[in-house]
Image: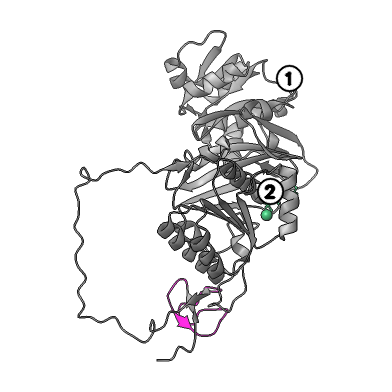
């Protein structure tokens, strides 16, 4: 049968197919669910021959399976390698998401340069910038290895042939939103194109064993532009984040088939590219105001690493009918809950007051272990009284105002001591278990009211 059409629009929720795009699926009524997909010849018209039998695979006992140590390639940037789980895994497909201008291209070029300097031939595919622009950037970064190859290309099939002929040790595709598959009529960056590109590259990575890094832009609401399935298809999803107005950049693993998630790498954007920050605590606390009301230091676990950060609270009289609750770098629901606990359990009347919360340095913290620190920051600003000298506050807060235990207290305590803090306010359960550290005073608390008494 002659192939007439190469693509079809399929509804992502019910599977309805149509040759033309529609805004609403006539089958299930979903809006904007039709996505263009490639149809291979015969797909539609030929039913699978029912008589063919597929050979049954042989299951194996889980104890008998041989584990192969995945060979990992160090990129020469330890912060980057750690987030990947200890280096680049052969045949892995890694998605690097982040806002435009955050430094994804810079990071990838530097990582490739690191590989190239170890004598590996690596390939940088750009669909966004001209070779001239890339050369200019590479000069700023001090790229010095001749085995870093550059090509500007947007046709995925051309890139696939390039992989076969060049056999590079690693590839970066910058970015997935610019890639184009000729089978699909839709424009680069559309859901269908992005998905098809990811699928083809996934197959290529697995078949060739070449690790492929896909750069992807993130939409305003934080999702990587393109279908969510893209995140399911790839092995690893890294987010490169940070405020473009700040110099700090945090590389975070949100999915990793070859290592732990939650691992972060901290970088600083300099004139000559990204520099690693081996001691983030010092960086995040560098500009902390001494003994200012509303400033609280706490220790947050980022993967296996404790990092000290400053939480700031500002409580002030509101000029508006509905007071403002502005939260940056923290979960705003969590803050609302803690404010309610403050009102009900320690009698601080915050109704009618504006509350602003911020994590200094543009960091984002989701851990409940910083609850007590958030509460202390708001209380400190409310009372206009600073925390005692050298205090660090930790603990999860429950709805009845109880302070609950947190994980990895030992590691956090060590970091706190290292940074020169002397007074540690923690949940009582943890305080009992904590080994004595010279020069560190530990106060265990059970209830937020108890913590307030010690602090103010
Ligand atoms: P870029 O890697 O192009 O971001 P992305 O690929 O995520 O869109 O980096 C963009 C910003 O980084 C740009 O605004 C300038 C800044 N930058 C530096 O400050 N120093 C440097 O050495 C380089 C290369 C970029
Ligand atoms: Mg870029």
Q: Earlier in the sequence, mark 2 or mark 1?
A: 2
In the image, residue 299 sits, relative to residue 80, either above or below, namely above
- Residue displayed at 73% across by 34% down: 315
- Real-space Cα distance between discs 2 and 1? 33 Å
Location of ligand 2 given as a quarter of the image: bottom right
Q: Nearer the viewer, residue 27 or 287?
A: 287
Residue at 43% in and 91% down: 2
Which of pointers 2 and 1 indicates the residue nearer the eye?
2
To which residue does mark 1 refer? 291
- Which residue is depicted at the point 71% across and 48% down? 138
Most distant residue in the bottom direction: 1
> Horizontal and vertical percent for residue 368?
52, 35
In the image, which disc is placed on residue 102? 2
x, y percent for residue 21: 56, 81
For label 1, being within 8 Å of ligand 1 is answered no
Query: Badge 2, how many Cα within 10 Å: few under 14, some, many 20+?
Result: many
The residue depicted at 52 percent of the width and 44 percent of the height is 253
């Amino acid at each position: 049968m002659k192939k007439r059409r190469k693509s079809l629009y399929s509804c992502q929720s019910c599977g309805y197919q149509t040759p033309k795009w529609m805004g609403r699926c006539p089958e299930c009524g979903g809006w904007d669910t039709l996505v263009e997909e490639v149809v291979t010849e015969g797909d539609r018209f030929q039913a699978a021959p029912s008589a063919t039998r597929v050979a049954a695979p042989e299951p194996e006992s889980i104890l008998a399976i041989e584990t192969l140590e995945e060979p990992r390639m160090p990129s020469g940037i330890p912060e980057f390698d750690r987030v990947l789980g200890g280096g680049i895994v052969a045949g892995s497909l890694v998605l690097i998401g982040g806002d435009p201008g955050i430094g994804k291209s810079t990071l990838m070029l530097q990582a490739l340069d690191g590989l190239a300097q170890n004598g590996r031939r690596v390939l940088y595919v750009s669909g966004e910038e001209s070779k001239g622009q890339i050369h200019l950037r590479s000069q700023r970064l001090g790229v010095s290895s001749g085995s870093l190859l550059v090509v500007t290309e947007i046709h995925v099939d051309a890139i696939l042939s390039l992989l076969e002929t060049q056999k590079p040790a690693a590839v970066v595709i910058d970015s997935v939103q610019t890639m184009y598959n000729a089978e699909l009529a839709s424009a680069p960056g559309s859901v269908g194109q992005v998905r098809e590109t990811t699928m083809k590259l996934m197959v290529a990575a697995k078949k060739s064993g070449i690790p492929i890094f896909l750069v992807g832009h993130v939409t305003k609401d934080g999702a990587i532009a393109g279908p969510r399935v893209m995140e399911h298809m790839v092995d690893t999803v890294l987010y490169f984040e940070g405020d473009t107005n700040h110099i700090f950049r945090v590389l975070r693993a949100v999915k990793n088939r070859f290592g732990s998630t939650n691992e972060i790498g901290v970088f600083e954007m300099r004139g000559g590219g990204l520099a690693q920050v081996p001691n983030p605590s010092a960086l995040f606390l560098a500009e902390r105001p001494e003994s200012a009301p509303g400033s609280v230091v706490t220790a947050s676990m980022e993967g296996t690493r404790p990092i000290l950060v400053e939480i700031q609270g500002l409580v002030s009289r509101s000029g508006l009918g509905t007071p403002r609750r502005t939260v940056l770098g923290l979960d705003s629901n969590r803050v609302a809950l803690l404010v309610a606990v403050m009102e009900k359990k320690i009698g601080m009347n915050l109704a009618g007051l504006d509350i602003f919360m911020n994590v200094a340095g543009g960091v984002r913290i989701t851990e409940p272990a910083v609850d007590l620190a958030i509460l202390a920051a708001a209380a400190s600003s409310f009372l206009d009284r600073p925390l005692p000298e050298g205090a660090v506050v930790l603990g999860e807060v429950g709805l009845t105002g109880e302070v609950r235990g947190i994980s990895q207290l030992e590691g956090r305590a060590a970091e706190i001591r290292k940074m020169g803090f002397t007074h540690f306010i923690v949940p009582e359960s943890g305080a009992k278990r904590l080994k004595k550290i010279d020069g560190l005073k530990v106060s265990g608390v059970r209830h937020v009211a108890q913590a307030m008494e010690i602090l103010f």
